[in-house]
Amino acid sequence: MVSLLQLLLPCLVLVGAGAISFHLPGDSKKCLKEEIHKDVLVTGEYDVSEQPGIVTHLKVTDSIGHILYSKEDAKKGKFAFTTEDYEVYEVCFESASSTGSVTTPDQLIVLDIKHGVEAKNYEGLAKAEKLKPLEVLLRRLEDLSQSIIKDFTYMKKREEEMSDTNESTSQRVLYFTTFSMFCLVALATWQVFYLRKFFKSKKLIE
């Protein structure tokens, strides 16, 4: 069993993710965006360093502007939601100074966002269903494989859409080129007859 676990563990490196940290200046706003598939569980954990006279607001929205999570005076906490469609989701931190000071210290923000397989609580699942470590690992690998299949299905769909778009564009370009050639030939023919008629009226040609 140990050797099998050692063989399967490297496959889970793909789903490992670490927290990110950044500094937020006073009276400023920083947002992080990410594209996520439909029906995907997203969890987040944040930790905002406290600074005297500074209040930081947290807001999670989708591309339409729907608020999925909002926290006034965010300090430390968690949030979770399930995506309803494939689109761009945005996490924004905005600081506001209540002291009116010209210079305010930066705040250190640590944010850990997980989605899909990495967002699931497999420890709780193991306790609830009384699963062995290998069974939990296999369940996680099964969820990971389904996630990969879902990604490939979406990529295939996008490829088909792009192929249809390219084909449609090529047909439009062909039609436009044909129409342009017809217009040029018609214009050249009209010019020939017009010039011939003009020269005849001037008795330059018979």
Image (cartoon, helix red, strand yellow):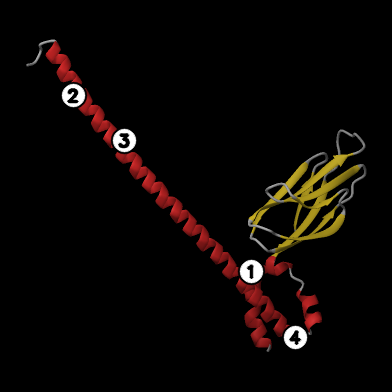
Residue 154 position (above or below residue 9): above
Q: Indicate which disc, 4 or 1, sits on the residue closer to the N terminus.
A: 1
CA gap between label 3 and label 1 equals: 53 Å
The amino acid type found where label 1 is placed reads Leu
Q: Indicate which disc, 2 or 4, sits on the residue closer to the N terminus.
A: 4
Q: Which residue is mark 3?
A: 180
Tell whether label 3 touches label 4 (CB within 8 Å): no
CA gap between label 4 and label 1 equals: 22 Å
What residue lies at 70% left-to-right and 84% top-to-bottom?
134
The amino acid type found where label 3 is placed reads Ser
Q: Which residue is mark 1?
A: 14
Q: Nearer the viewer, mark 4 or mark 1?
A: 4
* Mark 2 crowdedness (10 Å alpha carbons): few <14, some 14-19, many ≥20: few
The amino acid type found where label 2 is placed reads Val
Q: Indicate which disc, 3 or 1, sits on the residue closer to the N terminus.
A: 1
Q: Which residue is mark 2?
A: 192
